């Protein structure tokens, strides 16, 4: 079988529009070759091109002047925590201002958004809704818990006695001010309710899920993210995922990275040091979370009881 003629360098390994192909002198017969996919009209994708979300968006934007990447697609480009059903979503979300035609084509979900300049940013040269705006727009697509998980990630910041400081994608007060300034926007009440339950210092989505599971039990004390466990001099020796200083009890979520020999050695030191400093440690795993909140709450209750807590 005769192999297709190689594409010009400018078109190789990435999606492109027919206008771009024509500018490179590519004929119509070459654009019908079997080594090219047709995800939508006027767009071609080499079958050997790596799957890259930003590259996939670019030709759609060129064919929809004035459009901005938004919603789930914007969240994926920003690296925000999404539930599995959206993590590899096959469609792209594009938005245009009111008064302009909504993007309509295969593999595109079109929206209308009235965006201020400060609600937009640029990623890899592409227009995309900013992080705060993206969080607001996703309120109608995420559950309350999922919205809080993403919110915890957005505002997460901490300085520890080891490692570089973690800076918030959007500081909590800045996010709150942005949401407070929005009126008559869909799902704004849901965002405001979620803001009241967001906490600074969370390192991973499972830690947020764990915290929210415990919050449904009104008898349990609140566990705060990123609590320092200090020695007699007041120096922080251990940083817990979630801690209750009143009862000197901390929770550690052991994810997959805790299975490596190096991490296990660090965990062993942490476990011994936590006990030496007089704290009770409760380890929570993915399996624990899968068993549900009652099981997790019972496990945490046992740890608290060992530290002297008694159910009211």
Image (cartoon, helix red, strand yellow):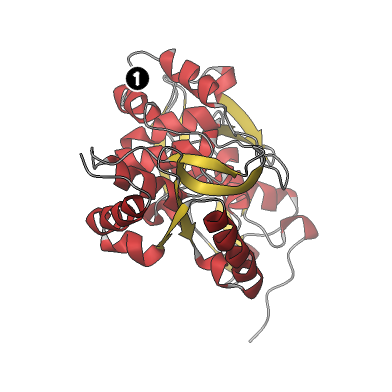
Q: On the rendered structure, is 175 left or right of 295?
A: right
Q: Is residue 284 above or below residue 136?
A: below
Residue drawn where x is 25% and y is 59% of the image: 295
- Give how far across and how far down residue 104 sits, in percent: 41, 40
- Give how far across and how far down residue 130 sits, in percent: 56, 30
Q: On the rendered structure, is 254 left or right of 237?
A: left
74 or 176, nearer to the observer: 176
Residue farthest bottom in this picture: 1
Residue drawn where x is 44% and y is 12% of the image: 181
Residue hosting label 1: 185
- Give how far across and how far down residue 143 sits, in percent: 30, 41
**Residue 17 in view here:** no
Specify the quadrant that holds the C terminus: top left
Quadrant of the rendered image containing residue 270: bottom right
Q: Residues within 10 Å of mark 1 (few under 14, many from 20)?
A: few
120 or 199, nearer to the observer: 199
- Disc 1 on helix, strand or loop? loop
Specify the quadrant that holds the N terminus: bottom right
- Give how far across and how far down residue 166 sits, in percent: 65, 39
Residue farthest right in this picture: 9
Residue drawn where x is 40% and y is 63% of the image: 286
């Amino acid at each position: 079988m005769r192999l297709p003629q190689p594409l010009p360098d400018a078109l190789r390994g990435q999606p492109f529009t027919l206008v771009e192909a024509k500018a490179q002198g590519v004929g119509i017969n070459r654009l019908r070759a079997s080594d090219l996919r047709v995800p939508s009209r006027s767009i071609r994708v080499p079958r050997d091109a790596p799957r890259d979300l930003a590259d996939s968006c670019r030709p759609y934007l060129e064919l929809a002047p004035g459009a901005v990447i938004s919603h789930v697609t914007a969240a994926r480009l920003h690296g925000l925590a999404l539930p599995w059903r959206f993590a590899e979503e096959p469609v792209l979300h594009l938005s245009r201002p009111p008064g302009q035609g909504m993007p309509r084509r295969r593999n595109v979900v079109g929206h209308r958004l009235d965006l201020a300049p400060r609600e937009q940013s640029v990623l890899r040269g592409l227009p995309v809704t900013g992080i705060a705006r993206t969080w607001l727009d996703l309120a109608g697509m995420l559950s309350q818990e999922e919205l809080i998980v993403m919110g915890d990630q957005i505002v997460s910041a901490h300085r520890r006695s080891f490692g570089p400081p973690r800076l918030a994608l959007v500081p909590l007060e800045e996010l709150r001010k942005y949401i407070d300034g929005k009126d008559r926007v869909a799902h704004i009440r849901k965002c405001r309710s979620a803001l009241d339950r967001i906490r600074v210092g969370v390192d991973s989505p499972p830690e947020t899920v764990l915290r929210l599971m415990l919050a449904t039990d009104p008898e349990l004390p609140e566990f705060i993210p990123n609590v320092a466990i200090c020695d007699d001099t007041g120096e922080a020796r251990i940083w817990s995922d979630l801690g209750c200083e009143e009862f000197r009890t901390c929770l550690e979520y052991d994810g997959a990275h805790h299975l490596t020999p190096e991490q296990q050695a660090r965990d062993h030191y942490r476990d011994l040091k936590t006990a030496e400093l007089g704290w009770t440690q409760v380890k929570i795993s993915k399996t624990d979370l899968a068993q549900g909140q009652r099981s997790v709450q019972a496990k945490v209750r046992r740890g608290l009881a060992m530290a002297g807590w008694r159910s009211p």
